[in-house]
Amino acid sequence: MSAVIKDPAQPASTLVSLRNLNKHYGDFAAVDNISLDIRDGEFLTFLGSSGSGKSTTLSMLAGFETPSSGEILVGGQSLVNVPPHKRDIGMVFQRYSLFPHLSVRDNIAFPLAIRKLPAAERDKRVEAMLKLVQLERFANRRPSQLSGGQQQRVAIARALVYEPRILLMDEPLGALDKKLREDLQDELRQLHRRLGITIVYVTHDQEEAMRLSQRIAIFSHGKIVGLGSGYDLYQNPPNAFVASFLGNSNFLAVKAQGNAAASFEGQPLTIRLTAHLAHNQEVLLMVRPEKAQALSVAQAASTPLAEGWNEVAATVSEVLFLGESQTCAVVTAGGTAMTVKALSATGMPLRAGEPVRVRWATADACVYTEWQASDLNKAAAAH
């Protein structure tokens, strides 16, 4: 039996509990013994690559898939045998699934009509939704007369109009172009703040997850391998897979020489204090590109290495200008590839083939004592 995954901040109120949830298709475990608490009113994102189990988990919560085993509780009540239309859960898909022959107004009103709400109450709620998603002027248009972003707003309004406690969203913005997707992300954040509804959102897009979510659950091979705020998962990833999957990372294979010391390619380094390290134990260091500095040999000579910092020699292989930032790819003497990122305003006057010194603060490098090369390969393939 797996333990419930928790992050350091304790939930004030749990609305949804997944307990030892499994979904098998023959011998394949699409969801593998997941336990998770979802807070009342939070925006939680399931993030992972295709086949990681995130959409299957969402489908079980919605009632479209039946768990092979385990429990789904909402407000302490089991939903496992409750049909989808009685779960008080709204759903928005990537494909908007609007009725082409109905107007915007009638599409939004449809869930109320099948629930047989009185006409006056129905009209009141529809008008409120049209205003909420800023589509009053388009109320009498058909879906074919709307842009993709407007159609998605209709789908969101239709899911919210009957006031569900939970809104599930499965890659809802995936079909939109980047600018429109970002605009709707901003609107979703504002909508969540205004309504205070619990939103569970599925995406494979890291940036989208970071922009939208209060917490992120990272999925891999049917399991949740990381859970927390985007800031915490990025700054202190719980394992090498999450470090590699969420953002860009430099990984250095080092050998421990004590609980706060290691050697890398024959030279000493300091590492975060890590208990129970055996002498010459293989350890993985992770340094984010923006936490590292690349200095020319002359710069390094004139700038003494500060206490609590490390330095390794390398050679520049490529410098890329990316608008507001620049990246410098380097290779150490032992063949380890690293990337250093700096704001363009700070300058990076380096050239391919130039020898450099790469520096980083000991406190900025995460230490992983349990890792496999396959973890890094899987995360790289998922990008």
Image (cartoon, helix red, strand yellow):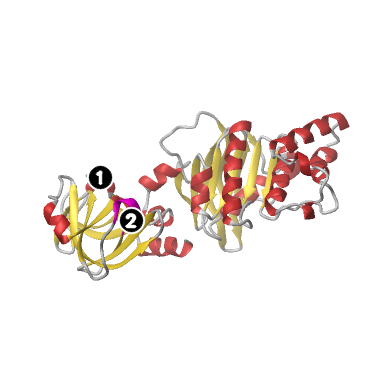
Q: Residue at x 34, y 54 (%)?
A: 344
User: What residue is rendered at 22% in x and 48% in y?
Assistant: 362
In the rendered structure, which amino acid carries the disc numbered 1?
Ala
* Coordinates of residue 118 in the picture (x, y in percent): 87, 31
Q: Secondary structure at mark 2?
A: strand
Q: Which mark is residue 363?
A: 1
Task: Give yes or no for residue 343 being in the magenta stretch.
Answer: yes
Answer left or right for 374 relative to 169.
left
Which residue is situated farthest in the right direction here?
A: 119
For mark 1, give the secondary structure.
Answer: helix
Confirm whether the magenta stretch covers residue 288.
no
Residue at 62% x, 52% y is 173
Residue bearing the label numbered 2: 341
Q: Is residue 298 above or below residue 271?
A: below
**Coordinates of residue 4 in the picture (x, y in percent):** 48, 41
Asked whether residue 343 is in view, the answer is: no
Which residues make up the magenta segment? 340-347
Residue 324 location, x and y as percent?
40, 53
The kind of residue tagged 2 is Lys
